Each structure stands twice: as structure tokens, then as C-alpha cells.
Image (cartoon, rainbow, N blue to C red):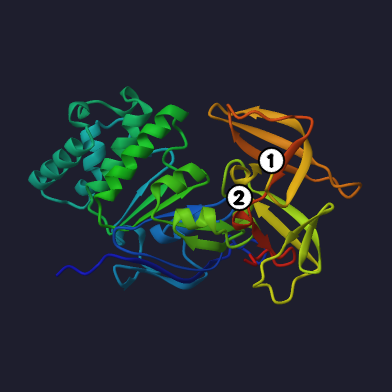
Amino acid sequence: MTPARTLELRQVQKAFSASVVPVKDLSLTVNQGEFLTLLGPSGCGKSTVLRLIAGLEQPTQGQIFIHGKDVTRQAPGDRNVAMVFQSYALYPHMTVYDNIASSLQLRQVPTAEIRQRVQEVASFLGLTGLMERKPGQLSGGQRQRVAVARSLVRRPDVFLLDEPLSNLDALLREKVRAELKQLFAEQSAPVVYVTHDQTEAMTLSTQVAVLHNGVLQQLDRPHRIYTHPANLFVAGFVGSPQMNLLPLPCQAGMALLGATPIPLPTVMTAPPDSIVLGIRPEQVRLAQPDDSPTLEGQVFLVEDLGMHQLLSVRLDTEGNQPLSLRVLLPSDQPFDPNLVRLTLPPRSIHWFDPQTGQVLS
């Protein structure tokens, strides 16, 4: 029986200097058949993590295991890891066939086996009719498939993908994203994918690791990342349009949104003096007569998103610090821009500690 293929990082840290530490004490496991996306803004450390796994960088401390074997100090060529780069890194003077076969030729795999493996992968990815072309004669989507084919033909223990769709236009990116999801669903090796694009992370992944300043903020299924953010950073970073995050004072078990008291969860045994209320724009509703509590405000901006309209509402806070709320409504839903009444469903509200940023409920 073939052992399960896994990738494990144990307390990995990478420091270029005392003040530049892009990866801090990172521990995570990617099991066989899992697709993990490293998600975060530019400079959060996600590409450095990929380079550490590939062996292109050495960790300052910690260990990396592939297939149960410690590869922390192993050379990149000895790790059986396949990497797809943002630029595809194809050889411009080689044909598609030679680009796909190059890694096998370097390993001195027999010619007959190379031909068989290249033909299998080319057929699977729809590249059979392009084998004699060179990269300059291919479209962006075709070059991307050649880069993936070159990684698949190696039959690696781990797939690494570094923002492979960022050079494609929006329509092609959507098409290729769907192809990648189907492709890697049929692979058993762990996949680690780096992106700052939330749509890619949410649609492709079985697990998402959100990074910020080199620190793992949350590791969970995509749906849980969206519906149960672990802290203020995740809540504000994941989601488009962004979650509403309102800093509010607290009094007698209530958060005060202007003159409107909003009950805090009863699980908070010691309610704080202040709190951050989080709610996604699509979960704010126009108030019905029996809704409570309700908020009133004026619409000062309407953004037409096609199927939806995004309203920016300045809330009536009776002389307190002005607050605004973004509301996502169906495009055909009418509203009064001069006086819009809103309600915040209690089950849709997230509460955060303004000092630590951690979720409170």
C-alpha cells in the first residue's frame, strides 16, 4: 500500500535580518488530495513560504517534511517538487513537447517513457495539436497549460503554484481557474497555491491559510474563513465588498450605535468597554415594520454592480462620531435614498476585541 503523500511545516521561520522576518513560526499540514491556498496582501510572506517548500530558500529555524521525510536541508532538485511560476518560465526556443519533457530529460528518464508520459499529459490538457509550436506562438491560456503539463509529467510529491493566473485577462482567468480546479481534483499530491486574489482562494481551495506580516491568521475551509473570521484582519481582508467594521462603545451589556443599543451575546461574561461590530454588506437588510433594532440614515453613494447595487449609508448617530454602513441589495430592490431604514440580523453580526483584534463570538 502506497503511503499517503503529505506536506508538513513545523514552526518554520525565515529571517533575512533582525527587522525583516517574512515568515514567523508557521506550522501547517497539507494532506494527500488537499488544495491549500496561501492568501494575503503583498509582502505577507506567502511567496517566501512557497520558496521554502521548494528549497529555493533555507528556513532560519523549523523543519519541512515531504512524504514524511525531513527535506529542510535538501537541495531543490532532490525534493520531487513541481513548481508553476507566475511567468510560466517556459523555454522560448523549445517546442511545447520539449518544454514539457525537459524535466524528465534532465533526470535521464528513458526516451520511450518520456514520450508516453508527455503524450498522456498533453492529451489530458488538450495540448496534443500544439506539440510542435513554440511558446511565442501560443495564447496566454495555452502557455499556462504547458507550464502545468511540465509539472504534471514529473509526477511530483507536491505541486507548488505561484500566482499562475495573474498574467491572464479577466475572462481567460475565469476559464483557466475552472480548468485548474478540475485538473487538481484528480491529482493525489498536495497542492500549495499562492495568490492575493480572494476569488481564486475561495473557489479553488479545500483549505485556505490567511497570512499577514508573516504570521498565520487563520487556517480553515474557504466557507469557514468567510463566515467565521478569526480576527479583524481576516474579517476585513476576505470578502468583496469588505465587511463593515464599526467601533462602538459598550454599556450595560449593549453596544451603542449612536442612540441605538444592540444587545451583546450573552456568552460574554465580562462585556468590554468598547467593541467592534462586524457585518457583511449582503447581510444588512432593509427594515420591515416589526424589525428591531433599526437604524436610519441617508444614502450618499450608489455603486451599480450589475446584479446588485452597493449602497453607502451615512447613519444618523445624533451628534456622535459619524458612521457609515455599506449595504448590498438586489439591483431591482427600491429604496428611499433620503431616509433608508436598516436592520442588522443578530445572527449575522461578528464581535471583535478592538485591542487584540480577536473574535469574541
Direction left: furthest residue: 112
- Residue 147 is left or right of residue 262, and the answer is left
Direction bottom: furthest residue: 269
Name the residue rendered at 29%, 43% in the picture.
182
Quadrant assignment, res 79: bottom left
Quadrant assignment, res 74: bottom left
Q: Is residue 164 above or below residue 206?
A: above
- Residue 185 is left or right of residue 325, and the answer is left
**Callout 1 amino acid:** Arg
Name the residue rendered at 70%, 43% in the picture.
342
Quadrant assignment, res 298: top right
Q: Residue 216: horizontal and vertical position, in percent?
A: 55, 63
> Which mark identifies residue 248?
none
Identify the mark nearer the N-term, 2 or 1: 2
**Callout 2 amino acid:** Phe
- Residue 96 is left or right of residue 168, and the answer is left
Residue to which mark 1 is pinned: 326
Numbered disc 1: secondary structure: strand
Q: Residue 320: horizontal and vertical position, in percent?
A: 89, 50
Numbered disc 2: secondary structure: helix
The mark closer to the camera, 2 or 1, is: 1
Residue 103 or 46: which is nearer the viewer?
46
Residue to which mark 2 is pinned: 237
